[in-house]
Image (tube, rainbow, N blue to C red):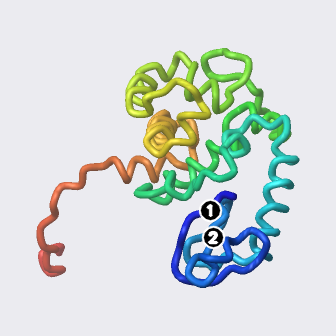
């Protein structure tokens, strides 16, 4: 039985310890939330969702499908700006505006090739192998403390280093402006001039 003690709420059923049932609630793991009561119905739904997830994940390589069921992923997004969090989500699902995915979806005039001439511009290629990004990769690998894509994108420090590397690369046009704004060092400004001084 996987569980941990929480606030004194009763969960009755075949999997509870009768002695502790008046003062202990079992949290089953998976995608249960600490602020919601765990009931037998929510436990059943969690089991059904896990089975569906496992079945759907078979044969898929994106990190989001390879992340252990019980690993909470919201912490990966902590302290990220909105555009960084969005880019991380796209990295983990591999539904992202890199050439391989765009060509697979039939976007006109897009070939799967990378600018370095490798056959496919994928998340794996960009994060780990593209020679055009070697200057960004060294810093990312040092911060991530790994060269394994799944490890990088399932750890907080690794995933955040990878998303910052991707944004600095400029490969995703939709994030260029947001990244430029976030990296700018704005000098302190003085008070506004009177409108009279403009004439």
Residue 179 circle label = none
Residue 3 circle label = 1
The residue nearer to you, when weighing 142 against 101, is 142
The residue nearer to you, when weighing 106 against 88, is 88
Q: Which residue corresponds to the image point at 56% horizontal and 47% vertical from the top-left? A: 88
Label 2 with label 1: CB-CB less than 8 Å:
yes
Q: Residues within 10 Å of mark 1 (few under 14, many from 20)?
A: few
Q: Secondary structure at mark 1?
A: loop
Q: Which residue corresponds to the image point at 68% horizontal and 16% vertical from the top-left? A: 118
Q: Residue 147, position in %: x, y?
A: 52, 24
Quadrant of the rendering where the N terminus is positioned: bottom right
Left/right placement of residue 142 relative to residue 28 reads left
Q: Residue 97, position in %: x, y?
A: 67, 42
Quarter of the view holding residue 112: top right
Residue 26 circle label = 2
Q: Secondary structure at mark 2?
A: loop
Quarter of the view holding residue 144: top left
Q: Residue 180, position in %: x, y?
A: 40, 47
The vertical placement of 115 against 140, above or below, is above
For this orientation, the residue located farthest to the front is 19
Q: CA distance from mark 2 to mark 1?
A: 5 Å
Q: Which residue corresponds to the image point at 14% horizontal and 79% vertical from the top-left? A: 194
For marks 2 and 1, the one nearer the N-term is: 1
The vertical placement of 17 against 84, above or below, is below
Quadrant of the rendering where the C terminus is positioned: bottom left
Q: Residue 107, position in %: x, y?
A: 81, 40
Quarter of the view holding residue 145: top left
């Amino acid at each position: 039985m996987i569980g941990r003690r929480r606030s004194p709420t009763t969960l009755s059923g075949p999997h509870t310890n009768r002695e502790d049932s008046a003062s202990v609630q079992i949290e089953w793991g998976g995608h249960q939330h600490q602020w919601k009561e765990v009931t037998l119905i929510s436990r059943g739904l969690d089991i059904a969702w896990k089975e569906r997830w496992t079945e759907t994940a078979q044969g898929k390589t994106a990190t989001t499908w390879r992340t252990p069921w019980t690993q909470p992923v919201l912490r990966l997004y902590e302290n990220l700006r909105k555009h960084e969090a969005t880019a991380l989500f796209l990295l983990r699902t591999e539904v992202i505006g890199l050439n391989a995915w765009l060509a697979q979806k039939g976007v006109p005039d897009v070939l799967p090739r990378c600018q370095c001439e490798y056959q496919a511009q994928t998340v794996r290629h960009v994060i780990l192998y593209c020679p055009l990004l070697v200057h960004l990769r060294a810093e990312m690998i040092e911060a991530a403390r790994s060269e394994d894509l799944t490890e990088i994108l399932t750890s907080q420090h690794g995933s955040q280093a990878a998303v910052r590397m991707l944004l600095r690369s400029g490969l995703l046009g939709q994030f260029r402006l947001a990244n430029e704004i976030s990296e700018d060092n704005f000098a302190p400004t003085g008070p506004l001039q009177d409108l009279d001084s403009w004439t």
